[in-house]
Image (cartoon, rainbow, N blue to C red):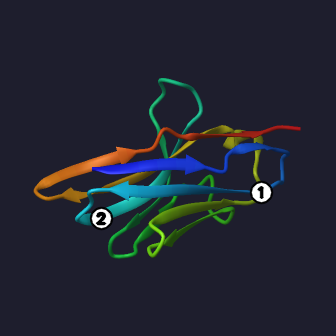
Amino acid sequence: QADLVESGGGSVQPGGSLTLSCDISGNIDAVHEVGWYRRQVPGQQREEVVTVTKDGKTKYADSVKGRFTIARDNAKNMLFLQMKNLEPEDTSTYYCKVSGASGETFFDSFGPGTQVTVSS
C-alpha cells in the first residue's frame, strides 16, 4: 500500500493562503485516484475536499471551488493542495489519500494529516 506524509499546515489569518504537500511512497503498482480530505473534529468522518481519478476527472467540494487547487508532481511522487482565500470554516486536519493497487491487492491509504487553523 501507499505510505503518505502530509506537510505544510499551520496557522493563517482569514483570506490567507497555504500550500499543503503530500509525499507518496510505497509499493504501488497502479494509482486509481488521489485526493485531499479533511476532518474538523476528531472521530468525525473525513470530508472529501478534492479528488482526481486516473483519467484526470477532478471533483472539488462546493465549499472550496475557486479557492483550492490540487496539483501533482509525478516525477517527485508528490501531491499538493493550494489553498487561497482561507476561511475559518476551513480549519481542519487535512489528509491526502491514494487509492490504488499493489499486485492483486487494492488499497485506500491516508496520511497522518496536517493541521490547518484559520483565525484572526
Residue type, label 2? Val
Secondary structure of the residue carrying tag 2 is: strand
Secondary structure of the residue carrying tag 1 is: loop
Q: Kindly indicate whether the residue at mark 1 contacts the one at mark 2 (C-beta within 8 angstroms).
A: no
Which residue was labeled with disc 1?
A: 17
Query: Looking at the image, how many numbered discs can be counted on the residues?
Result: 2
Residue 85 as seen in the image, left or right of residue 70: right
- Where is residue 117 shown, x and y percent of the image? 73, 38
Quadrant containing the C terminus is: top right
Residue 36 as seen in the image, left or right of residue 103: right
- Where is residue 109 shown, x and y percent of the image? 35, 46
Residue type, label 1? Ser
- Where is residue 48 shown, x and y percent of the image? 47, 48
Residue that appears at 50% across and 70% down: 72
Q: For residue 12, which quarter of the picture? A: top right
Residue that appears at 24% across and 66% down: 30
Which residue was labeled with disc 2?
A: 31
Q: Marks 2/1: CA distance?
A: 29 Å
Which label's residue is closer to the chain start, 2 or 1? 1
- Where is residue 19 shown, x and y percent of the image? 68, 58
Residue that appears at 69% across and 39% down: 91
